[in-house]
Amino acid sequence: MKFNQWTLALASVGVVSLGSVAQAEEQHSVMTALSSTTISGYVDTSVNWMRGDRGALPGRTFDGMDKQDGFNLNVVKLSLEKPLDEAVSWSAGYKADLVFGPDANYYGSLLNGGGVSGTSPAGTVASNGNDIAVKQAYVSLRAPVGNGLDFKMGVFDTLVGYEYFESGSNPNYSRSYGYFIEPTHHTGLLASYNIADGVAITAGVANSTYGPINDKHMDQKYALLAALSVTLPEATGPLQGSTFTLGYVGGGVGAAQFGGAGSDQDVRNYYAGATFNLGVEGLSLGVGLDYREDFSNLADAGDNDSYAMAVYLGYGVDKWSVNLRADYLSDGANTAFGAGTTGERRNELGSVTLTLGYQLWENVLTRLEGRLDHAFEDERPFGTSDENALTIALNAVYKF
């Protein structure tokens, strides 16, 4: 390590030691590198109850039978991020989302034994069995092209869907059927560009549409990702801030998704969503539409298209919030609860969810939710004789 002349002079008379100076400069270098890193996250807990026969809860994610009739730690999330510097042309940063707890098993990697249960991409998860996983981890880069061309390389969230893994960022505690049939994350390269104020496009390529981190299609059939988002400007009056999103994710499914058996599987997800501000402070209307095509040479492929739609009505004032969701799923891939009994081999589910939120404590989101699921076409997926399922949950999330 090189020292300036003043430091050498002080060392020569015993005022300072070169070793202490070197250690201090190394610490300063580390602190400088970390000074722009932010730390955030949350702890998500719940208590859940289900009425009637303890059979099954098809179409549900993160609040299935294993969460009912008891207290639950859902997940702990820790995020480290250095965001891109808007003042620097060639800016660089990173983000790492680490998740701990039962819901962390939704993610996995090939290195820690991440595998998948089930016979279809929809609703199946990459489980590492260790309650510890990486949700996102990517390097972010900006090139001074036009308004700025941003890149993400690594593992990142999918581009499609109205709802998020983070329950506290959603209108409701439980996830929709649309979330059940959507991909969640990809390993690849993503590019984003703001065409104009409020108009952004995103496109990229990934190893696969579904599968654990680093999972690849056996025949190198990559997944293509694309999205367009629009936010209405101030000139639109009461609709100001309303958002519209179109998204597409399509390509091969990772070989580990079915232990190699699904290597020929090709899945395409189409998404359209919007959130409207209705001119009344705190009142919003949301719509999410998902359509999935599943092309496969599996013996039971059949009619494997699936679609889900959800309508969200929300109102928030002061510390209170009320969110109502109506949800529908038509699943031809038989992934929700197996082959149908009506001859058409389609699963049809509907649900109504009411969520009441109140923020009594600082940084804590508390919600009480009631949800009624209904199976159509004389199906009984919730138990030996139930075509309906009623669940109640109390959710508490501390954000830091």
Image: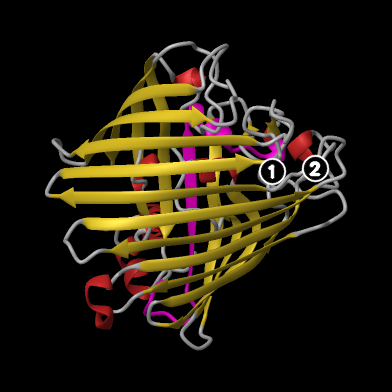
Q: x%, y% of residue 282?
A: 19, 56
Secondary element under disc 2, as helix, strand or loop, is: helix
Q: Name the amino acid, label 2.
A: Ala
Instruction: Tell me how far mark 2 sits from mark 1, CA to CA.
Output: 8 Å
Counting other residues with Cα less than 10 Å from the Cα at mark 2, is it few (<14), some (14-19), or many (20 or more)? many
Secondary element under disc 1, as helix, strand or loop, is: loop
**Along the polypeptide, which appears first: circle 2 or circle 1?**
1
Q: Which residue is mark 1?
A: 211
Decide if residue 124 is on the left or right side of residue 257.
Answer: left
User: In the picture, which quadrant includes the C terminus?
Assistant: top left
Among the 4 quarters of the image, the one containing residue 152? bottom right
Q: x%, y% of residue 226?
A: 61, 67
Labels 2 and 1 touching (C-beta < 8 A): yes
Look at 40% across and 29% down and name the residue there: 372
Q: x%, y% of residue 285?
A: 32, 57
Look at 42% across and 39% down and name the residue there: 77
Q: x%, y% of residue 26?
A: 42, 57
Residue 108 in magenta stretch: yes
Identify whether 312 is placed above or below 370.
Answer: below
Query: Between residues 265 and 150, which one lies in front from this camera angle?
Result: 265
Q: Name the amino acid, label 1.
A: Gly
Which segment did they paint magenta? Answer: 85-111
Decide if residue 141 is on the left or right side of residue 318.
Answer: right
Query: Between residues 73 and 19, which one lies in front from this camera angle?
Result: 73
Q: Which residue is mark 2?
A: 255
- What's the image's color scheme? secondary structure
